[in-house]
Structure formats: C-alpha cells, structure tokens
Amino acid sequence: MRAKVYSTTLVCLLLVFAGPLSAQPKKVRFSVSAVSIAEVPFRIAQVKGFYRDEGLDPEFILIRGAVGMQALLGGSVDFTSASGSTVAAAVRGLPVKLVFIASAKPQFDMIAQKDIRSVQDLKGKIVGISSRGGAIDLLTQLIVQKHGLTPNKDVISLVVGGQEDTVLALRTGRIAAALLTPPRPLILQREGFNRLAYSGDYMPTYPTGGIGVTDEKIKTSPNDVLAFVKGSVRGLQFARQNRAEAIKILSDYFSIKDPALNEALFELYLSRLPVDGSADDAWMKGAIEFTQKSLGETGKEIPPSKVFDFSFVQKALR
C-alpha cells in the first residue's frame, strides 16, 4: 500500500514539473551592428543568462546598420540593435519601433589621422562610414556641417564597412577620419591618432544601440518582445550594480588585457548610459527632428508614438 502511495506521488510530481523541465528556450535572431560598447547590455545579458531566464535563446548576428534594418523588415531577424536605422525607417513611415535604448547619447568619437588637428582640416578629405543612411552617416554629416563644411562636397563619405574595417582603413591611410565607438578611440589615441569630436556634444538626443522591432512583431509576439527587453534591462542594470564583474565581461568581450584601459572604457561606458533603457518626450522629439533634418524631410510633425514604444521597458521595470 505504501509503495502504491509513493508511486502515485511520484507520478503527480512528474506531471507537475514535466512542462518546465522539458521546455526549451525559444530561439530568436538579433542583428548587431558591430562589436561595440553600445552592445554591452546585450552581451552582459547573454553571458549572465538573463535572456534564458526569460525563456529566450538569442542568436547574435553581425550585420551592418542599414542592412540590419532590411533583414528586420524581411523577417530574417527578430530584433536589431541598429537604433539609428530604426529611427530613420520609422520616420520614413516604415512599420518599425525602437523599444529600448542602450545609450542615451551617441557613443561615437571622431578619430582622425595624426596630421589632422580639427574638423575643418577634413576639407577635401575622405571620411569613412559603415553604410548610407545609418547613424554613423547622419552624425558624420551633422558634425562636418557644424564646422562649416558641406557633406559629400567639402568632405567625401566612403562606405568602408563595420567598425573593424573602419579602423583598418584609418590605420592604412585609406580614410582621413571616421566615427568609432569605444574602445577603439581610446586605443587609437594611444597610437597617436587624434580625437576631433564627440558626437554627443553635437546631438545629445540620439541613441546608439537599442532594440528595433517591427510593428508586426509587437502585435503578434508581444511576450517575446517583452522577454527580450526584460533581459536587456537587466543587462543594463547589472553594469551599475556589479562593477568588477561588468569590467571582466567588457574585458573578455573586447579582448583587452590592459587593466587601465578596461577601467577607462568602463568609466566612459557608465557616463553615457540611459537611466533605464527609455527616454522622455523631449528626447524622443529631438531624435525625430534630427533624423528628419538629416533625411531632408522636415516640415511634418511626427508623434513619438510612431517611432518609439517604451511601454515594454516600463513593464520590464515593474
């Protein structure tokens, strides 16, 4: 009789736990623009298992900004970190939203050849960009315009590829300058290259890195979107609360062995973090207006709700 009771109890326990034990994380695809500081919250979330905690198994795929947007719209990926391209696409009326920001300011620093001391010195020179219409392209145009130069006339933009391709083009003298994300500017400055500008001083209301998603995904798979945002928010918060371990993750991610360089990189990263992965109306309107101006589509008022949806961040925080 006792054996029968134990047997029945065991069967009940197996039935109760069969679902959770057998459940497998759902695979999703996430396109990232580059191995850069803007991707750090996602890297932390991946390393610490935050996405798996939320039932997801993300595959990270390296795709340039504008191409990443095409992959998103075509359904080849579920999410993209190409925040600038997401905002630009939404401003143009395409059915996408930015639902999380990894950096409240642009992360890019303009680094130039050793003989170039100012932005004005770029007149007649070639600057490198990753793609046409992406964040790097738009911010490069803004910086040279602020210094009295005309993009694609006084300063020629050349598509050279991702961040590592751009560093190579700079070191080999193929280009005069380019916008780069940390730790690359810190490393290149040690080699004698010059830092001409920080993009955040020219455009403080513009994201670098985030989560772009289609309206269709938001409509049909809101739980997946929320799960991915929740994992990313945890990655964002982890850096502030666990300094030593976060620095170790950054060190491994960028393959940097120099402790001083890791400390400098981490301090720079903290200084450019958003409060919680979202932004207020003034920030959103500023990002939209800048994008409209860059695209030559001024004059039409676009409500933030057409471009951003930070409701998932708010739910994640709750």
Image (cartoon, helix red, strand yellow):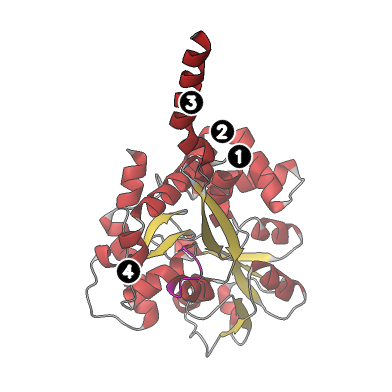
Q: Which residue is mark 3?
A: 11
Which of the pair 28/149 is nearer the observer? Answer: 28
State the residue at coordinates (39%, 45%): 276
Along the polypeptide, which appears first: circle 3 or circle 4? 3
Query: Callout 2 environment at 10 Å: few (<14), some (14 to 19), or many (20+)?
Result: few
- Residue ranking furthest to the top: 2
Real-space Cα distance between discs 4 and 2?
A: 34 Å
- How packed mark 3 is, by other alpha carbons closer than 10 Å (few <14, some 14-19, many 20 or more), is few
Residue tagged 2:
242
Element at label 1: helix
In the rendering, at what x and y percent does residue 262 appear?
68, 45
Q: Pointer 3 and pointer 1: residues touching (CB < 8 Å)? A: no
Residue 98 vertical placement versus 6 (above, below)? below
| Residue 115 vertical placement versus 224 (above, below) | below
> Which SS type dominates the magenta stretch?
loop
Q: Where in the figure is residue 33, as x and y percent of width and height? A: 56, 66
Q: Which residue is mark 4?
A: 288
Local SS, label 3: helix
Mark 3 or 2, nearer chain start: 3
For residue 246, the mark is: 1
Circles 4, 2 touching at the beta carbon (< 8 Å) = no
Per the rendering, the mark at residue 310 is none
Q: Which residues are magenta?
A: 73-78
Give the distance between the C-alpha atoms of the residues marked 1 and 2, in whole angstroms: 6 Å
Q: Amino acid at mark 4?
A: Ile
